[in-house]
Image (spheres, helix red, strand yellow):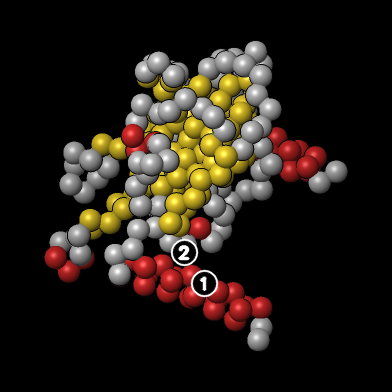
């Protein structure tokens, strides 16, 4: 059997497993991994990002500019379970001990469908850039249903030492056929703080800078 044929069989098997689980009304499996990375509140911050293995996408990048998803960029971290994630009927969250989110749907026991959360330690005082998108289907195409998608501008901010942040996509569903969305960052703590953080639109990284980054990663 050729490698191409094995790949096609693998995709078909994953898709069939997900379709059967969905058809029988099963709830997607959700796994939670607890990690203990080094965290010094004097020099670091923590960030929780909500994403998913369905039609969502999110990434975190060191620096104040963004690169395209298809570019090789060692500075960018994708918030998902990898290439095959969309075909699996499951998701995996990673927690590191951040305070509970004020948003129930950003807690491990309140996640919807194949949503997930990932928590990261990031250097304080250095900008990070957030890229996010989502999509969905409403109803059946035969009976007036439609598909929609939303990808806002990448946004950047500079975390403050010792502070914790929730990152999520705010979606306005007031329009029937269109969706407006934006990246939101809120500062949180263990006492109910839920403070919006001012963001800046991130520019695209210069092509020469991306090339240098890629080249240096292979040296």
Q: For the point 81% across and 46% down, which residue is it?
A: 218
To which quarter of the image does residue 153 belong? top left
Look at mark 1 in the image and give the residue it sits on. 11
Left or right: residue 170 versus residue 43 is left
Name the residue nearer the viewer: 117 or 159.
Answer: 117
Residue 219 locus on image (x, y percent): 85, 43
Q: For the point 40% across and 52% down, which residue is it?
A: 114
Q: For the point 58% across and 51% down, which residue is it?
A: 70
Left or right: residue 159 versus residue 100 is right
Left or right: residue 176 versus residue 159 is left
Pointer 2 with pointer 1, Cβ within 8 A: yes
Element carrying mark 1: helix
Element carrying mark 2: helix
The answer for how far apart the CA atoms under marks 2 and 1 are is: 7 Å
To which quarter of the image does residue 207 belong? top right
Look at mark 2 in the image and give the residue it sits on. 87
The correct choice, above or below, for 140 with respect to 70 in the image is: below
Left or right: residue 58 versus residue 1 is left
To which quarter of the image does residue 4 belong? bottom right
Residue 97 locus on image (x, y percent): 54, 29
Label 2 crowding class (10 Å Cα cut-off): few <14, some 14-19, many 20+?
A: some
The correct choice, above or below, for 65 with respect to 158 in the image is: below
Residue 146 locus on image (x, y percent): 23, 58
């Amino acid at each position: 059997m050729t490698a191409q044929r094995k790949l096609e069989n693998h995709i078909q098997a994953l898709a069939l497993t997900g379709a059967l689980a969905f058809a029988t009304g099963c709830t997607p499996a959700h796994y939670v991994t607890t990690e203990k990375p080094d965290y010094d509140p004097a020099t670091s911050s923590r960030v929780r990002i909500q994403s998913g293995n369905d039609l969502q996408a999110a990434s975190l990048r060191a620096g104040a500019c963004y690169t395209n998803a298809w570019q090789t960029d060692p500075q960018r971290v994708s918030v998902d379970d990898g290439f095959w994630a969309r075909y699996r009927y499951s998701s995996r969250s990673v927690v590191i001990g951040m305070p509970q989110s004020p948003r129930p749907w950003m807690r491990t026991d309140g996640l919807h469908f194949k949503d997930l959360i990932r928590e990261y330690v990031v250097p304080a005082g250095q900008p990070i850039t957030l890229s996010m998108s989502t999509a969905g289907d409403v109803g059946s195409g035969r009976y007036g249903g439609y598909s929609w998608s939303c990808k806002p501008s990448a946004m950047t901010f500079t975390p403050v030492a010792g502070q914790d942040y929730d990152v999520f996509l705010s979606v306005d569903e007031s329009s029937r056929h269109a969706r407006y969305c934006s990246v939101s960052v809120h500062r949180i703590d263990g006492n109910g703080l839920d403070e919006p953080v001012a963001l800046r639109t991130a520019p695209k990284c210069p092509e020469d800078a991306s090339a240098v980054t890629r080249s240096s990663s292979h040296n």
